[in-house]
Image (spheres, rainbow, N blue to C red):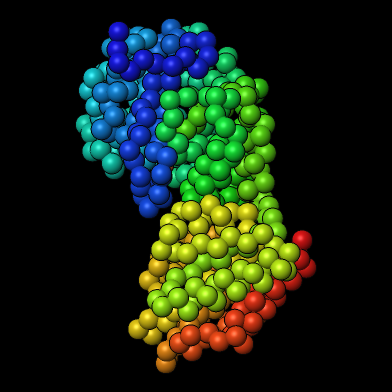
Amino acid sequence: MTNFPAVQVSDSIYWVGAIDWGVRDFHGYQTPRGSTYNAYLVVADKMALIDTVKAPFFEEMLSRIASVADPGKVSYVISNHAEMDHSGALPQAIAALNPEQVFASTLGVKALKDHYHLERDFTAVKDGGTLSLGSMTLAFAEMRMLHWPDSMATYLPEQALLFSNDAFGMHLATSQRFDDELEESLLDYEAAKYFANILMPLAGLIPRAIEKVGTLGDLKIIAPSHGPIWRSRLGHIVELYSAWAAGRKSRKAVVIYDTMWQSTAAMAKAVTEGLTAGGLTAKLLPLRASHRSDVAAEVLDAAALVVGSPTLNNAIFPTLADVLTYLKGLKPKGMVGAAFGSHGWSGEGVGQLEALLTEMKVELAAPGVKAVYVPDAAVLAACFSLGQQVAGKVRERF
Ligand code: FEO
């Protein structure tokens, strides 16, 4: 008996991954609910391990494998993605399991070599290639850039099961392994946050990927590499992915700001009231209390982004630079926006914010509003009006 039992996913398929209850940062993405690194064991004539886990969790994975099978009898390891949350334990797994072959996509083989500099060879599989396990088959489908160039998914036709790796995943540590054991609103939020922070820059590739998955065969289970396994709400998550990939927006605005002496904060509140009065749902995110990855999650379905910063040393406040650099990289599309902020003397902040929004291809709905030191009633009215003008531009579009 092991302290880390495997969890049966379907006939002869077991989850043998690890739960990382304590992780709070995933390369800059804040993960307040932890994460899981999902590995799966296919118990067939030839046993296959699909992906591994982050390096410190190797023993947990090995223990789960040992709960259902002799780890020494694993013939193949499939590495769907070389990022270290899935391949970190691969060197240890190779040493402990001594598999006959380790498979990855062509780019995956190169990435694994560049990561681990191991002596042993990896076997490249072609897009559309298959591997017989005797009683079952694995079919490989490249998913380039979802999330890295090497990414691929592995389909198991006999179980109508897709090991989708990062796609359809989320950072969520729970003792439940399946979607129908968890609250829908929690899953929807964490899936959206994951999509926004990991997949949004590559959203244009997703419709084809979904189409490709559809050609593989029936789909009853999607087993991603993070978070719960989809066995009941597949249609829902695929529909959400289609909508996010298509850039579906709602009448919602996100306002982000930072402040030194509460002047820009007061402006932000006035802008937010104007947005609301203009018919939008507005989300005000003070950057001292809002992580960049939470901002990204809110931006995913927002039609407007309004940003405020005081001028500090002739520049925008550092938290704005952080979040806007991050958002620019995520390439959200189809938004309108505006800028506002207070200053004492030079006042470059608002212009710099507008330049950044323009670089992000956010359409400016109106010229920015500036306050000298502390906004008076006229400036706050201009901020309210700015929110209304942004709302008006959004209403023209939707
Ligand atoms: Fe979960 Fe791209 O790694």
Residue 215 occupies which quadrant of the picture?
top right
For this rendering, which residue is in front, 200 or 99? Answer: 200
Q: Which residue lies furthest to the front in this view?
A: 377
Judged left or right of residue 218, residue 17 is left
Identified at 65% across, 76% down, the residue is 384
Measured from the top left, where is residue 381 in percent x and y? Answer: 64, 82
Ligand 1 occupies quarter:
top left
Q: Is residue 367 above or below residue 336?
A: below
Measured from the top left, where is residue 191 in percent x and y? Answer: 54, 41
Q: Can residue 133 be seen in this view?
A: no
Q: In this view, does 267 lie above or below 49?
A: below
Measured from the top left, where is residue 192 in percent x and y? Answer: 56, 45
Judged left or right of residue 60, residue 210 is right
Identified at 63% across, 29% down, the residue is 234
For this rendering, which residue is in front, 173 or 209? Answer: 173
Q: Residue furthest bottom?
A: 345
Residue 220 occupies which quadrant of the picture?
top right
Q: In this view, does 14 lie above or below 91?
A: above
Measured from the top left, where is residue 106 in percent x and y? Answer: 42, 37
Tell me the quarter of the image containing the N terminus: top left
